[in-house]
Structures are given as C-alpha cells and as structure tokens.
Image (cartoon, rainbow, N blue to C red):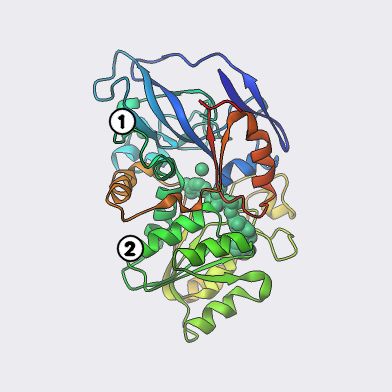
Amino acid sequence: MKAIVYRGPRQVAVEERPDPKIEQPGDAIVRITTTNICGSDLHMYEGRTSVEEGKILGHENMGIVEAVGPGISRIKVGDRVSVPFNIACGTCRNCIGGWTSFCLRTNPTEGMDGAAYGYANMGPYDGGQAEYLRVPYADFNLLELPPGTEHENDFTMLSDIFPTGWHGTELARMQPGDRVVVYGAGPVGLLAAHSAMIRGASQVFVVDKEKDRLDLAGKIGATAVDFSRGDPVEQVLDATGGRGADCGVEAVGYQAHDPSGDEHPELVLDNLVKSVRSTGGIGVVGVYVPEDPGAGSDAAKEGRIGFDYGTFFAKGQHMGTGQAPVMRYNRHLRDLIIGGRAQPSFLVSHELPLSEAVEGYDRFDKREAGWTKVLLRPSESA
Ligand code: NAD
Ligand code: ZN
Ligand code: ZN
C-alpha cells in the first residue's frame, strides 16, 4: 500500500509499505477513505519531537472496515467508522474512568500513559495517512457512522479535532451564557469556538494573527482578535468591561509565538491568565512536552514553562490539561452533525490524493493563506 512516512525535519515521502495484517484477535483493518493532516503532525514535521524516521504518520482517520480478527463481535466488515486518535484497551482503570487518552496498557513508552496512531512517544503504532490501518481493540475503539458518503468532511473531524475543541471547553468548565476566549484559530481553536457556540456561549473571542483563520472565526459568529494589531489581553478586557472572559481555551501549544514569529512557550498561558476573570477556568488542549531539545531556553528544553503561576493563584483560576479522550464526546458530536446542529467541515480548505500530501504538509506548515485544514483521500490517485 501507499503511505506517508516521516523522513526527517520538513521531509515526508509517499512510500510503498506492506498492507497491515490482523495481529491480535481484537484487531480490525480499516480501508481509509479520509485522513487529515493535523497541527500536531507539524510538531513532528518541524523536527520538534523524537519521532523516528520511517514512521507512517496520521492519527485523524476514518474509513470502511475491511477485515476483523476472531475476537471481534460488534464491528462488521463493511461498517463505516471513525477511528478515535486514542488507542485504548477499554479495561484498564483510566479507560473505565472515561480517560481513554491515558490508557494504562497500550503505550509501552516509559512514563507515558495513552497511545495514538503515527505519533511521537505514543507507542509503536503506524498511522493512517495510508491506504489501510490496523486498529487494536477495535470493538471498543471504533465509532460507527451511517453508511454511505454523506457528511464525510464533517465526520472526519470526529477522530480528533472536534472532540479536542469540545474537550477544551469542558476542561475550562464552560457554562451556557459564558463569554469564552480561545487562543489559536487553527483547526482546534476554530472547533473549540464552534463547540462553545453550540454549548450556549454568549460571546466567543478567537485570538490569532492569520487573517484567513480569523475570517473563519468571524464566519461562525465569533469575535476575531488579531494579536498582530495590539495586545490581545487589552482587546479582550476592553470588550468585557475590564472584567475578562469567563473562561478560556488554549489551542496553540508549546510553539506559541509573538507577532514577529519568535517562540515564547509561556506567552499564551500568561495571556489566558490575564484575559480570564478571577475564578474562571482555562482548558489547555494545545500540546506541551516534557522534553523539547529545540526550545529557546534551557528550562523549556526540559518542559519547564515559566508562566505567571502567581497571578493564576491570586485569581483563584483552575486549569485542565492533556490529550482529549475522544470517545467521551464523539457519539454526541456525531449526532449533532447528523441533526444539523454542528458543521465542523466549515474549516476544510483542501482535499488531496496521497500523492499530493508532501506539498500539503509544506504549505499547511507555512500557514499559507487559505490552507486551514487538509484532508487526504488515499483511494484517489493524482
Ligand atoms: P495549528 O498549528 O494549525 O494552529 C495553531 C494556531 O495558533 C496558528 O493559527 C497560529 O497562528 C496560532 N498562534 C501561534 N501563536 C499564537 C499566539 N501567541 N496567540 C494566539 N494564537 C497563536 O494547530 P491545530 O491543529 O489547530 O492544533 C493546535 C494545538 O492543539 C497544537 O499544539 C496541537 O498539537 C494540539 N492538539 C491537541 C490535541 C489534544 O488532544 N490535546 C489534539 C489535537 C491537536
Ligand atoms: Zn490531530
Ligand atoms: Zn486502557
């Protein structure tokens, strides 16, 4: 089969790989119909992780079940499914508690709970930017979708970024009527904003500097805040009578930068502490890492991010963090799509065959205007 493989910083290649096989009784093989490039893939693409060369990338996968192992009873060949990016066993303490993003069994990496497809430090699993994908514990993990091809571009957001955006609002303990500030208008930030609107926010601010992304935020009814035109904190405080938003979502991550492009990993956390009111919540879904050899300071190289913890404490705020447990939300979000209440496909800008993925990575990585979310279609040839 054809697959997208990591070959070093800013290098991916389309390569021939053996088709995946059933290895365990609970496995399924999924023929991928749509797989997305994610902002999380860019941390690897830019050489800012320890991902090994030769890894097949891709954790945002959906498709049709092609084969199932002898231990499978729920899922059937021919089912149309969304594959949560978390690989979870379903029976460990964290899975039973609903925290499939911290499964205790599926990731053999020392000190890391939780596994994923095609990702640095998340276990030995191939990704789905390929024609086929092996799914462990498939009866537990796979989400069934209505047959056919309807809503393909909406449903493809169920494997990661729609649940992740929703999780950001959940970690922030958002309530109906809240004013919500979201930092980052990438796909995750935009779907956090979409989630906040669906959950009854009275106003949603979205902070970024990329005009096309801010325009999309405006299109879904959010208030765009351009941080290249002045301090975003002042803009949010001015718009809220000096009080600040009721809660906030961090959808940027450790490569946060200032308007000139210089990285400051503490910048967005500091801005959130300042632009959220006292006792408000902050949901951090942007990724931070324990080791970042490419960081600008010695502390940040060891994951030590010097944000304003003093003000955070003084304001009595709370913060929730981590990878999203997709399964906690994906059934509800699927049904919101089917019911016409959610349209996460609004951010799709490109639908490409695998052969054009190399260019897709390059242009999405440069945040080129108009490249907001790239979907790959492995069954289509260029
Ligand atoms: P992205 O890189 O496309 O978007 C990030 C956006 O942040 C960009 O538009 C950038 O211009 C903006 N930005 C940079 N510095 C900023 C600043 N100082 N203030 C405001 N905005 C700033 O990525 P994405 O796909 O939207 O993902 C966002 C983050 O979420 C990444 O760190 C990704 O790894 C992470 N993520 C986490 C999970 C999870 O489960 N927790 C899942 C998916 C993605
Ligand atoms: Zn993703
Ligand atoms: Zn588990």
Residue 287 visible to an observer of this rendering: no
Which residue is depicted at the point 49% across and 76% down? 314
In the rendering, at what x and y percent does residue 286 appear? Answer: 54, 53
Q: Residue 140 carries which label?
A: 1
In the rendering, at what x and y percent does residue 320 appear? Answer: 44, 57
Tell which residue pokes out farthest to the left in this image. 73
Which residue is depicted at the point 50% across and 82% down? 239
Q: Residue 199 carries which label?
A: 2
In the rendering, at what x and y percent does residue 97 appear? Answer: 30, 43
* Residue 133 in the image: above or below residue 361: above
User: Tags 1 and 2 in contact by the CB under 8 Å rule?
Assistant: no
Q: Is mark 2 on a helix, strand or loop?
A: loop
* Residue 205 in the image: above or below residue 328: below
Give the mark nearest the N terminus, 1 or 2. 1
- Asked where in the image residue 38 lies, by quadrant, the reply is top right
Q: In which quarter of the image is the C terminus?
A: top right
Which residue is depicted at the point 37% across and 58% down? 170
Query: Mark 2 is on which residue type?
Result: Arg
